[in-house]
Amino acid sequence: MAECILQSRKPHTPGEEGLQDQMLMEAIYESAKTGAPVKLKASDTLDAFRGTPLSDEE
């Protein structure tokens, strides 16, 4: 992340992906607590927020 900040690059794993992970974890806990499935909105595209991966050469 520091490298992205220093080079003004978009991170490969942005905060939106972390937010999505957190929403999934909350749904898992809610489902375990209630014993019922929890529905979440599906993402429109695969890796919708993912930036360009850093190469070893950069």
Image (spheres, grey):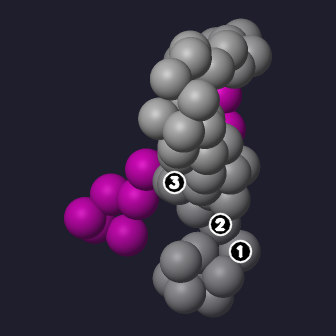
Residue 5: image x %, image y %? 66, 82
Looking at the image, can residue 16 be seen? yes
Work out how far the residue at label 1 is from the one at label 3, CA to CA, in angstroms.
12 Å
Frontmost residue, 5 versus 56 = 5
Distance from disc 3 to disc 2, alpha carbons, whole Å, reads 9 Å
Q: Residue at position x 56%, y 17% from top? A: 36
Q: Magenta segment range?
A: 48-58
Judging by the rendered image, the residue that carries numbered circle 1 is 8
How far from the left and from the top, in percent, is residue 31? 54, 29
- Amino acid on which the number 3 mark rests in the picture: His
**Does residue 55 belong to the magenta stretch?**
yes
Disc 1 secondary structure class: loop
Q: Nearer the viewer, mark 3 or mark 2?
A: 3
Residue 25 is left or right of residue 9, and the answer is: left
> Residue 23's image quarter?
top right
Q: Residues within 10 Å of mark 1 (few under 14, many from 20)?
A: few
Given this view, does label 1 or label 3 mark the residue nearer the observer? 3
Which residue was labeled with disc 3?
Answer: 12
Q: Secondary structure at mark 2?
A: loop
Q: Main secondary structure of the magenta part?
A: loop
Q: Position of residue 21 (x, y in %)?
A: 55, 46
Asked whether the beta carbons under mark 2 and mark 1 sit within 8 Å of each other, the answer is yes
As helix, strand or loop, the secondary structure at mark 3 comes to: loop
Disc 2 marks which amino acid? Answer: Arg
Quadrant in which the C terminus is drawn: bottom left
Q: Is 10 included in the stretch rendered in magenta?
A: no
- Name above or below for residue 56 compared with residue 43: below
At label 1, the amino acid type is: Ser
